[in-house]
Image (cartoon, helix red, strand yellow):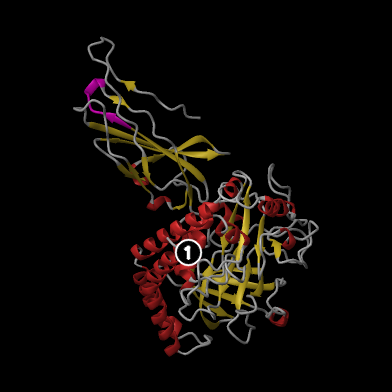
Amino acid sequence: MLVLATALVACGTDDTCELDTAPVAPKVMAPLEDRIDVVAEDLVIDLSPFSDPDADDLHGGTEIEIWYVDHGVPSDRVWSASLEGAVTQATIADGTFDFGTDLNDWTKYVVRARYRDDRGDCSTWSDWSTDLAFRTDDGSSYLFDPEVIREVRLTIPPESWDPINAEARPPGCVPFTRTYHRGSVSFEGETYEDVGLHIKGGCGSARDLGQKASFKVKIDWDDPLVEGCPDDRKLLGQKHLTLNNNVQDRTAEHERLGYELYQAFGVPTPRAATVKLYVNDTYWGVYTHVESVDRRFLSRWFESNDGMLYEGTYWCDLTPDHVPPTETDDSYCLTREFKDDACTGELDDGADPLTYTPLRDFVGRIAALPAGGFYPEIEEFFDFDTFLSQWAIESLMSHWDGYVFSIMNNYRVYHDVVTDRWSIIPTGIDQTFSGDQDPWGVSGTLGVKCLAEPDCEAAFAARLAVVSARFVSMEMSDRAAHIHDQIALDVMADPRKEYDNSAYADAYNGLIDFIGWRPGRLDEILRAHGF
């Protein structure tokens, strides 16, 4: 393990040099701290400007190192660069690997740097910079590249067609579990046989195989007819594909726009990209491929992916009466996303049990907060600051079908066992960017309790104003136009869409209008509430 260097003076042994003051240690400015999708060939390491207490000292050289991280500790140097002159930026090509020829996929590293001044034999090195952590991409950046429309091909064999179709539509607006059936998926010439397929969607978006059905694909499906556990298979880092049909979004871009907005504020949400879907070699149209919320997703956003994840659907609040009374009863509206079976394997030390105990403890702590003692006390065990951003964004988008407002739907709640705090992960944002949702018209207990306290209400109002102003500065109408130009011809050629091209044009124009007037409307609402 590396011991960080202090000021090193390269003076001769004849003591003819005065001791030089070391330069200031640089700061690594890029990649961003904890970035999780670094591609080595695209990596640019940017450092803060050279600074030295000796005003006349020039920048003589730069050293940069990348270290492999093992269980949170830098353990082996894998790459380094020694650069002469006033260098504050470098790429992988500027250095050499200690072993291997590239950074490994989906691996944690730290990067550090130091500067040398230019005083001949008396040149002095700074301390090393603070380690900046990042994780390399797992291949999924290619899969979710927003600038490319890729093709996905599913094959549903005859023996799976009817069983899949029989579970197409849920029996109402209630939680509904479907069974995976055998099929295959092909992507850019590579085919994965014996994957699990089923239709997805709730009471509003579910369609059968005679229509434009949405799909869930499980790459490492555990086929019940095959003994033993499945192979650990991934398609560009993904074990699951979620292919949404856009039937409730006639622009076919709400999810892409909305998730980008969440992510601009650090709200943990899936990535999304447009794909063209073929089923049994027949073109089914334009779909939105949305990143599945699984252990891999959790690793991208949280300190640990060993916590427990639950899904909330249809009028399901974070209250004790909505948690099942037993540890494995999945018939309630809050359901487990991770379950124990013969192939689960042993949990890591400190991991949450795959039961409802963590969730029951969490909602119990919320319920126990007394009137007037909700905020900021809630921050002790829940990431309420990020929730304020989520609430403000959903207000701006008029996302009435999420956790905060009347339906209390389309969300996951996750416990990070390292930070011991909970977070909400919003999903299902196709029905957005229209309407006039009242930001104060909340139903979820977190919002209700917040608005009951003046300090918390003021914190929400301030966040809403920040989100609204940032939304304007992001020029989202330009982003919407860019996506529209990218997908329009494919949407118009979509053989299974449930609207004509005139309705598509009207929906897009409505989106642009909404983006234009919504911030002003939020300003009116804020003033009406005294902010």
- At x 57%, y 72%, the residue is 401
Residue sitting nearer the eye, 20 or 361: 361
Label 1 Cα neighbours within 10 Å, binned few <14 / some 14-19 / many ≥20: many
- Residue 209 within the magenta-colored segment of the rendering: no
In the image, residue 496 sits, relative to residue 226, either above or below, namely below
- At x 48%, y 77%, the residue is 435
Looking at the picture, how far across and down is residue 101, in whole percent? 44, 45
15 displayed left or right of 506: left
Q: Which residue is mark 1?
A: 393
74 displayed left or right of 171: left
> For the residue labelled by badge 1, is the local secondary structure a helix, a strand or a loop?
helix
- At x 26%, y 24%, the residue is 123
503 displayed left or right of 126: right
Looking at the picture, how far across and down is residue 275, in whole percent? 49, 73
In the image, residue 318 sits, relative to residue 50, either above or below, namely below
The span shown in magenta is 115-122
Looking at the picture, how far across and down is residue 477, in whole percent? 36, 72
Classify residue 448 by image quadrant. bottom right
